[in-house]
Each structure stands twice: as C-alpha cells, then as structure tokens.
Amino acid sequence: MRNFISKLFIIVFCVIFTLLTASCSFNSEKTYSFDNFSVTLPNDFSEVTDYGYDYYLQNSDCIIAVTEETFNSLSDTGLTSESSTMDYANAIILANNINAEPSLGNNSNAFFEYDASGIDGIDYHYYTAIIKGSDAFWICRFACLQETAAEMNPLFREWTDKITTK
C-alpha cells in the first residue's frame, strides 16, 4: 500500500509539473524586430502590414501601431534632434487636439493616455509612447477596449520599456 501511495504521489506530481510548465509556455515572449525597431511582447501577437503604419501588431486584446518620424521630416515643425520626447508628445497632442497631459516614463520616454470612440462607435483607450532613437522619434500607439484599460495599461507600460531602437 505504501508503495502504491508513493507511486501515485510521483505520478500526480509529474502531471501537475507538466501542466504548470506547459501553461508557462503559453505566456512566453517573443521579440518582434523590424528595420530599426524591436519590441518584446507575448508571442501571441501577429504582424499586419496593410494599416498604413510602419509596423502594426495585434492580438485578441490590443493593437500596437508604430510610426517612425525622422528628425529631418519634422524640421518644418520646429522639432529637431535636440527636442525631447516630451516636446514631441506635446506637439502630437496639440496637432491632434487630444485631451491629454504627457508624462515622462522610464528611459526618458514620454507617454500620454486618452479615451475616444472609434469610427465603429466602440470606445477605445489609447496609450501613446514616444521613444527617441538616434535619428527619429518613434510613436507607439497601444489601443484596447476602454473597458479593459485598467488591465492593459500596466502591460503597455511594461512593453514600452521593452522597445529598442537604433
């Protein structure tokens, strides 16, 4: 009887260990790399190429739309390579009449948040991060349903810290 209980315990332990290890692999991360931009996200994101952004990733919970704005292309706006991410965030907010206040996050990245209705009539939450590269600003627009914003915002902040540019 004692031998049977020991074997049963080992089998149950192996099953639980296998299930726990398998569930961790569902949450594994992947680095999505493009020309001068990369971001580490959960591996369930997929790239979409026809939305008019430089890079566009989506999963069932959110989207990430990325645009590169070179310093040369911004020269008419008064922004230069000496401008900060806060300068650029303020320029975006002003130009697009967005009701938001920019904040400074980790790694000198600026970000701002706002809610808006999409053309589909659904309310969305937007978290926009501005990252400064060596020759451009990168605008990373994260979006999710407004009702999931409290759950998604910490992830948006975490993912912003996992962005690298050249």
Image (cartoon, rainbow, N blue to C red):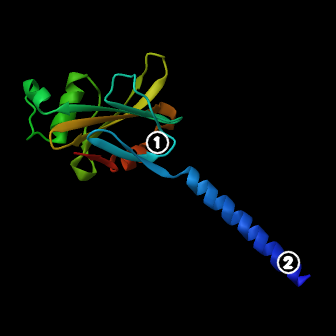
The circle drawn on residue 152 is 1
Split into 4 quadrants, where in the image is the C terminus? top left
Residue 144, position as x, y percentages in the image = 46, 33
Residue 25, position as x, y percentages in the image = 57, 54
Q: Nearer the viewer, residue 59 or 30?
A: 30
Residue under pointer 2: 5
Find the distance from the CA under tag 2 to the CA under tag 1.
Answer: 45 Å
Q: Amino acid at mark 2?
A: Ile
- Residue at 51% across, 33% down: 147
Q: Report the side of 21 relative to 114 (left or right).
A: right
- Residue at 42% across, 34% down: 57
Please tell me which of labels 2 and 1 falls first in the chain: 2
Residue at the limit of the structure toward the front, as seen here: 35
Work out whether 123 lies above or below 119.
below
Helix, strand or loop at mark 1: helix
Q: Quadrant of residue 38?
A: top left
